[in-house]
Amino acid sequence: MAESCQFANVSEEGEIPSFKGSDKAKATDFANYFCSYAQLYHQKQMLADHNRMAAYHAAIMGNPDVFKDKVVMDIGTGSGILAAWAAQAGARKVYAVEYTDMAKHAESVMQANGLSDIVTVIQGAVEDIELPVELDGLEPEEPGSTRVVDIIISEWMGYFLLRESMLDSLIRARDKFLKQKTGLMFPSHTTMFVAPVYDEEERKISLREYSGAMSDWSEFADTTKSVYGVDMTVLEKDFEKEQKEYYLLSSRWSELKESSLLAEPAMVKELDMMTCVLNDSKGLFKADANSSFDFDVVSGNGSGPISGFAGWFTADFKSRTDSGSELSPQVSNPALLSTGPENGYTHW
């Protein structure tokens, strides 16, 4: 008997499949998530995101004093552009870690740009890799420690910051490889925002698509009964539930104008990338510091009804703010990436 399909993106232990997952869990995770990142068209979409590119370029190339002679790890390097910038900014050694076969393209990019002597591309899950400490003459923070990296850079953020599972990997890599006293995370801080919005066109599109799906089902059920003699109406309630969850209860990507906001955004979660823990990667919780919030929406101002709620995030590249960071380098030229309505298009 065939096994039932399971789509939960977690291992048997509740972790992301790339960490402590069975072969089946890892294979499902790879199919669901990582395969798209092995395609150049997907990499091109991200590389064509000007706001994304400008923020990372400013953060890395605008702070050569921070990167000079440092050991850098780029987690989820993709085509390798962040690793290349780190090398161009003066890094002594860069480890570009990539889980998918995009690693082969990253190697080609390093060779084509004369950076292969600085950038080493490592294909594999960052949870599983080991760095060539002795071979590359790396200096651990403490004798026998694996903490040999000065800076971790990564574009790990997903829709509404936490949609993708890379934050788990980032935290584990930080706790294994990054120097605690002097290390830096790029980005250094991330913040999630929510606000009520007016976007009736998008809401009506969702309603039309849902109605269309249900009309198609009705026609399908009638045809199946009249032509093939089998009554499928017993499945209608389950089909309706699926379609309602997909069209009406699921979030959708939308490029909003700033004028769509009906109230001041509420900050719902803030992460210091040096101190956040694995539980932070799992979402928003009632016990979180900013889990309770409200909005002051003024009716009758001509901006229309509340069509829904929008969520976005910002990512800062700045100096450390955690306790015990006195010895870490100061980022003299901070940068900011915002995926909010005020900033125009981003692929988020």
Image (cartoon, helix red, strand yellow):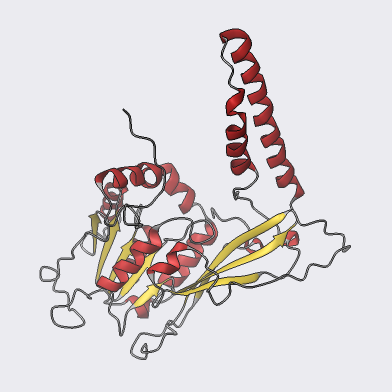
Give the answer, above or below, for where 162 lies relative to 324: above
Picture quadrant of residue 167: bottom left
State whether residue 101 appears in this view. no
Left or right, 324 with respect to 340, comes to: left
Provide residue 111's location: percent of width, then percent of height.
Answer: 25, 53
Number of residue marks: 0
* Front position in the image: 277 or 30: 277
> Which residue is located at x 21 percent, y 60 percent?
129
Left or right, 297 with respect to 331, comes to: right
Picture quadrant of residue 245: top right
* Front position in the image: 156 or 110: 156
Provide residue 95's location: percent of width, then percent of height.
Answer: 26, 63
* Direction front: furthest residue: 234
* Front position in the image: 102 or 113: 102
> Which residue is located at x 72 percent, y 46 percent?
203
Give the answer, above or below, for where 13 lies relative to 242: below
Give the answer, above or below, for where 60 lies relative to 7: below
Left or right, 37 with respect to 159, comes to: left
> Which residue is located at x 32 percent, y 47 percent?
102
Provide residue 164's location: percent of width, then percent of height.
Answer: 44, 55
Q: In the rendered image, which quarter contains the N terminus?
A: top left
* Direction left: furthest residue: 134
Left or right, 344 with respect to 174, comes to: right
Provide residue 208's location: percent of width, then percent of height.
Answer: 72, 36
> Which residue is located at x 62 percent, y 63 percent?
340
Q: In the rendered image, which quarter contains the C terminus?
A: bottom right
State whether residue 153 appears in this view. yes
